[in-house]
Image (tube, rainbow, N blue to C red):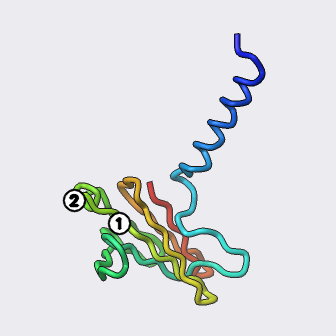
């Protein structure tokens, strides 16, 4: 039978893993109270390498990038999220994702989910 200390340690370990490995359904561009994403650029590697990727499919309000081949080449993906207030957030996707989907709502606000 587990004693209380072991159970507390196990709960803490599970919470730590959940925090360090966010759910794939979460937004890739962090939410900010003061602003919202107005554009997103996905890169093969770092933005400094200037290898921005074109979406596999791009519609007026949605589209997606297929990214498995980037990781197959032992590289990683970086997402730049540009906000209405001019802020730019860099998100390094060091763990393999196969696809990033984007949607644009009626207010022209972007949301991006990678999985």
Q: Please identify the residue farthest to the left as the structure is shown.
A: 73
* Residue 5 higher or lower than 55, as above or below: above
Q: Which of labels 1 and 2 is toward the front?
A: 2
Q: Residues within 10 Å of mark 1 (few under 14, many from 20)?
A: some
Q: Is residue 41 left or right of residue 39?
A: left
Q: Which residue is located at x 74 percent, y 29 percent? A: 8
Tag on residue 73?
A: 2
Q: Is residue 69 left or right of residue 59?
A: left
* Image position, residue 17 (x, y; %): 58, 42
Mark 1 or mark 2, earlier in chain: 1
Report how far apart the C-alphas of labels 1 and 2 lie in the structure. Answer: 16 Å
Please report contact status of discs 1 and 2: CB closer than 8 Å, yes or no: no
Near-viewer residue (67 or 64): 67
Q: Which residue is located at x 59 percent, y 85 percent? A: 87
Near-viewer residue (15 or 101): 15
* Residue 107 higher or lower than 10, as above or below: below
Q: Which corner quadrant holds the N terminus?
A: top right
Q: Which residue is mark 1?
A: 65
Element on which disc 1 rests: strand
Q: Is residue 65 left or right of residue 92?
A: left
Q: Residues within 10 Å of mark 2 (few under 14, many from 20)?
A: few
Q: Which residue is located at x 44 percent, y 71 percent? A: 79
* Residue 104 higher or lower than 101, as above or below: below
């Amino acid at each position: 039978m587990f004693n209380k200390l072991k159970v507390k340690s196990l709960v803490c370990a599970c919470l730590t893993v959940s925090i360090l490995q966010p759910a794939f359904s979460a937004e890739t561009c962090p939410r900010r109270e003061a602003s919202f994403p107005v554009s997103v650029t996905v890169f093969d590697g770092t933005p400094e390498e200037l290898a921005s990727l074109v979406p596999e499919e791009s519609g007026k309000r949605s589209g997606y990038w297929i990214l498995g081949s980037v990781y197959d080449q032992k590289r990683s993906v970086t997402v730049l999220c540009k906000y209405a207030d001019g802020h730019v957030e860099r998100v390094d996707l060091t763990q393999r994702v196969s696809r990033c989907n984007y949607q644009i709502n009626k207010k022209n606000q972007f949301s991006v989910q990678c999985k």
